[in-house]
Image: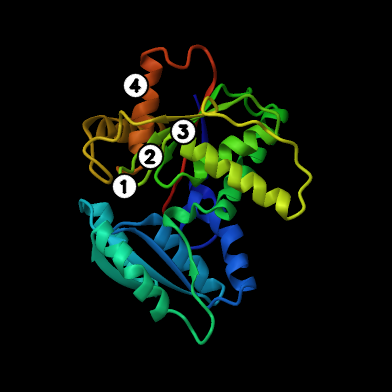
Amino acid sequence: MWLKDESGYGGGGWGGNKVRKLEWLLPEARSRGARTILSVGGLGTNWGLAAALYAREQGLDVALALVDHPVDDHVRAQLRRLRSSGAALHFLHTKTRLILAVPWLVARYTRGLTLPYVLPAGGSSPLGTLGYVECALELAGQVRQGLLPEPGWIVTPVGSGGTAAGLALGLRLAGLRTRVLGVVVNDTLRLDGATLVALAGKAHALLRARGADLPEVGLGPHDVVAEYRWLGPGYAHPTGPGEQALDRASSRAGLELERTYTAKAFAALIGLDSAGYFGNAPVVFLNTFGPR
């Protein structure tokens, strides 16, 4: 097993996979003249915190609509960070109330004729997905440099889809045969393999529409496997295998994981490897968690 550690990515108050997406999204928001980014997430949203911290550096405000999920020490710490980040927080409790509140939120954060820049959970729009196309190209460069063999699989948690979709597209553009195993940790969104491939296709179409001379890549469901068996009771609900994986990563490798995303993905990797799922192929675990 190899580790691609995204925790060091980003120079601000938060790191990890969200920052790769924000590198693409924040310039787009500014080019549209937006003054506020409006997005959604759970109470302990890593995405919302990263968006608030990096948008503030760009002179943009952030408003977050939040829904309830189980609360632990990590979530309580995140809420303290969110409150000090300068983001406007709207506690809507349920997905239904969030959906009903969206028109009101858009109206509230419209400045004159300028609408807020509205982003889905996790920044997983076609544009945000390009952050992980870039990551896959970086991984391919590391393979070419001899830092690791070509992986058979890359394992990543899937909370909103952009990371897995971008990896799948970037790996094929780089000419690698590596497949993506996305460990689904969110039961509030549709995140099956077909959905992830469709998002990758939209990112590919966006690149071509903006002038990139790219070949067809022929992505299919076999390129992105969505694995649901480590979800447990639902989003942000801790699981026994996740707790064991979190402890194992910390004690044996000094690797900091968290219960909602990365511990479940690492538990899936351990369980599937024990069952012989990966065969003898090298496997890369993508650590998307980036605290500071």
Distance between the Cα atoms at labels 2 and 4? 14 Å
Q: Could you tell me residue 117's position as x and y percent? A: 51, 69
Distance between the Cα atoms at labels 1 and 4? 24 Å
* Marked residue nearer the N-terminal end (4 or 3): 3
Whether label 1 touches label 2, CB < 8 Å: no
Q: Amino acid at mark 4?
A: Gly
Distance between the Cα atoms at labels 3 and 1? 16 Å
Q: Is residue 119 above or below residue 141?
A: below
Q: Which residue is mark 1?
A: 188
Camera-near label (1 vs 2) is 1
Q: Which mark is residue 193?
A: 3
- Which one is in front, 121 or 47? 121
Secondary element at image label 2: helix
Categorize mark 1 by other alpha carbons within 10 Å: few (<14), some (14-19), many (20+).
few
Q: Could you tell me residue 243's position as x and y percent? A: 25, 35
* Marked residue nearer the N-terminal end (1 or 2): 1
Whether label 1 touches label 4, CB < 8 Å: no
Q: Is residue 277 above or below residue 123?
A: above
* Marked residue nearer the N-terminal end (2 or 4): 2
Using the rendered view, name the quadrant where residue 263 is placed: top left
Q: Which residue is mark 4?
A: 271
Q: Amino acid at mark 1?
A: Thr
Identified at 36% across, 46% down, the residue is 189
Q: Which mark is residue 262?
A: 2
Distance between the Cα atoms at labels 4 and 3? 20 Å
Q: Amino acid at mark 3?
A: Gly
Q: Which mark is residue 228?
A: none
